[in-house]
Amino acid sequence: MAIPTPRKTSTSRDLKSKKETTAQSAATKELKKQLLKEYKNAWDLNPADEHDFAFAFAEEYMAFLDQARTEREFVTLSVETLENMGFEPLQSKAKLVPGDKVYKNIRNKGLAIAVIGRQPAVTGFNLIGAHIDAPRIDLKANPVYEDGDLVYFKTHYYGGIKKYQWTAIPLSLHGVVHRADGSLLTISIGDRADEPVLTITDLLPHLGSEQMSKKATEVIRGEDLNVLISGIPFSDTETGGRFKLGLLNLLKEKYDLTEADLVTAELEIVPAFPARDVGLDRSMIGAYAHDDRSCSFPALVALTSVDRLEQTGVTFLFDKEEIGSEGNTGAKSKVYEHFIYELYAKQEDQPNQLDFYRLLENSRMLSGDVTNAFDPTFASVSDPRNNAYMGRGINYMKFGGSRGKAGTSDANSEFYASIINLMEENKIAWQTGELGKVDAGGGGTIAGYMANLGIEVIDCGVPVLSMHSPFEIISKIDLYHTFLAYKVFFQKMAR
Ligand code: MN
Ligand code: MN
């Protein structure tokens, strides 16, 4: 059955003057502006000189990314920066007063930083938390073996990766080895142009027909992520295992290491290419570990670029988010709560538990983490009306979780609205999106662990394309507005 076509009749409407029509459309336009929520592209919003700031901030960020390839390197570089800016170790201070700038190094893999505000601690702190670990490939305890006249590392990958994406690309090696004599060796090999890189091999297509018919999760299996490390045998042709011995001999000569030293080492394999501008307009950045350094770097810079604060500002840089925030460097650890307590106790003559609990309940937190940017090529996994878009600014996510909001921290409307007001008042581009369709999947963040302490928390951060791949993509304008949002939060968020 066809739908009947309405009969076209001439009405007085057609005869109205053009002037009236224009007036009416202006009124409708005004009404639409009042009633509808439109998410604008942030490149359109502010004067062009903002683009220059965004590009300049991106330069700083990219330079930092190229130096901080792992959570340990992020901490080392941050501590160096903080020390240069006059921040002091919290444990070195007996008392804290407004204006004091302190930090605590959490076992070289996490970091807590604070600027003491003028308001009493019990009125609550403004906190931003983000993670500095990223998906990668770790070495096993007994990594070195030889096969086919070559030497490899056995690995166990870290975080949620598509394993096939990590083959046939240049990789670098980072981490620490504590030798038997107690000395420490810090390793970083493969990121400078004059250094060698490592790699994981893939099968040639000529022989790949069976491989290519497998499910993508099985094309490269966990035990296939073997890192190619060397190929020159030890000179004594009479001995067995010459290729492995050749490598161990090199490790001894160059780094004074034995195979036993590797057992307790923490060695991580990450992509070996630097951050690059993406797009002919250079509007985007391609790099490893935007998740979550595109939030943790702005969180660090935001706190170090404010001077006098009303409410005490705290930045937490967490480890282990990608594998569930467990352990004494992850967001579930009491060590971060202890830091808040120490900040409180060192400002009070008679600290007491009840006031500390009040402080927590009066505190507000932005949980900085990336989200998926809408990808037209893979549109079917997203609800296009409730997904973040590249270039529309910092993305707020009231809840994460999936399939019935399972496991999420759902931000309270009262708090969320106050944050959005702050964004609007300060002309910061913001948007909102969920990570994928309701039944499609989802992701966890650190928000819940902080909310469990009684703190008001909401997730927010930068939209990312190709998340968890070796080459993730973000928009420079989103990065910049995330930085602005974090800074304004420290400067102006009041109880
Ligand atoms: Mn993340
Ligand atoms: Mn992640």
Image (cartoon, rainbow, N blue to C red):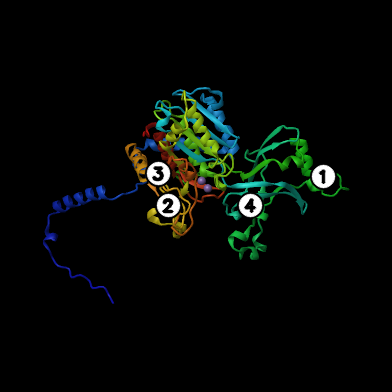
Label 2: state its secondary structure. Answer: loop
Work out whether mark 3 precedes mark 4 in sequence or the reverse, and give the earlier one: 4
Query: x, y (%) of residue 256?
Result: 76, 35
- Residue at image location 12% in from the left, 57% down from the top: 16
Which label sits in the foreground, 3 or 4? 3
Report how far apart the C-alphas of labels 1 and 3 lie in the structure: 56 Å
- Disc 4 versus disc 2: nearer the observer: 2
Q: Mark 4 points at which residue?
A: 168
Q: Looking at the image, is mark 1 or mark 2 nearer the viewer? A: 2
The amino acid at mark 1 is Phe
- State the CA–CA distance, disc 2 to disc 3: 15 Å
Contact between marks 3 and 4 (CB within 8 A): the answer is: no
Q: Which mark is residue 393?
A: 3
Residue at image mark 2: 434
The quadrant the N terminus occupies is: bottom left
Whether residue 257 can be seen here: yes
**Mark 4 or 2, nearer chain start:** 4
* Tag 1 and tag 4, C-beta contact below 8 Å: no
Q: Do the residues labelled 2 and 3 touch (CB within 8 Å)?
A: no
